Image: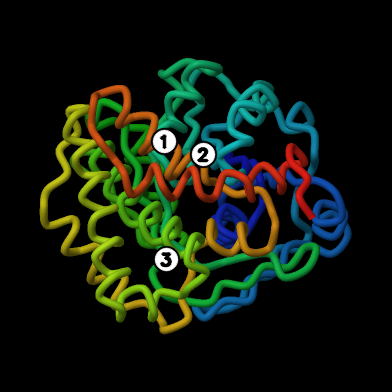
Amino acid sequence: MRIAIFGTGGAAGYFGARLAQAGEDVFFIARGEHLRAIQQHGLHVESVKGDVDIHPARATSDPAEVGPVDAVVLGVKTWQVRESAEAMRPLIGPETVVLPLQNGVEVCQQLAEVLGSEHVLGGLATIISYIVAPGRLRHEGGPCSIAFAELDNRPSERVERLRAAIDHAGVSVTVPANIQSALWSKLLFVSSLGGLGAVTRAPAGVLRRLPETRRLLEAAMHEVRAVALAHGVPVNEDQITIATANVDSLSEGGTMSLQRDIIAGRPSELDAWNGAVMRLGQATGVDVPTHTFIYEALLPQERRARGLERFD
């Protein structure tokens, strides 16, 4: 398959490297020093599943140099999705599909508004991988998987073709029976743990050990499920049990990307995680006091990170 990796960060870059290693026709869209390093020295991945060295790697900042592809794997941050959708237009042919890997439940609609829903799949990824230097990624282990499906959950040849390519690349891949349920279940986990971790500045080991913060964590998870149900998305009660078990399985010092970004003073995905729960709850009359508090408490830090507030 002819595949473009739009945003060659830790997650999409890793999956793209595996696909290129398996013989797929992969193009990496990147920018800045990261792009220059990939162009000059290739893309290097240090991985517990075996290192990958894609050299030469076809990389550019201009999608027009690539042209239409079979699939675009989108690896940018949630607040960059609309801008990226406009920029990737040269990659989109009549049969092109876009596979977003962002955490959140609003990304597919944002892509569809720009590119048309016929080009968009629902997707999510689970992986611990990040850029350690220009042109270099590190995959540290833990779960490593992709799940995706058509937005209406129908079986399709294009989904099966992409699934087969990813499977051949050695990556665990599934096609959920209900992709919206899968997306909301992931949001239930990341927004609750990430948001509470950002407010408390405490890692998973502390949050799960203290009865007070564990109650808050579970309350936040129940709120997400309630909002999903109000929007007609089936999220079973056992997803909360699964999510809390996942929290319990994390390392003592485990943190989420939102928490790390907030603490480091970087822009975060607060709006797409806790903000989305708050907005979508308000739209259906579902009260979400835990997520509302998390969002409003973190908003000043988020605005400072984006240059909208100064209180140093």
Q: Secondary structure at mark 2?
A: loop
Is 4 rendered above or below residue 232? below
Task: Report x, y in % for residue 230.
Answer: 18, 29
User: Which residue lies under the disc numbered 2?
Assistant: 271
Q: Dot 2, how many residues are within 10 Å of its Cα: few (below 14), some (14-19), or many (20+)?
A: some
- Disc 1 marks a residue whose amino acid type is Ala
- Give 115 or 260, whichever is nearer the viewer: 260
Q: Residue furthest bottom?
A: 252
Mark 2 vs mark 1, CA separation in Å: 6 Å
Front-lying residue, 51 or 133: 133
Identify which residue is drawn at 80% across, 39% down.
Answer: 61
Which residue is tagged 1?
Answer: 276
| Residue visible at 78% across and 68% down in the picture | 133
Which residue lies most toward the front here? 311
Q: Is residue 150 above or below residue 271?
A: above
Please, what is the three-letter code of the amino acid marked with disc 3? Cys
Could you tell me if the residues under marks 2 and 1 are in contact, i.e. CB atoms within 8 Å?
A: yes
User: Does residue 61 appear anywhere in the picture?
Assistant: yes
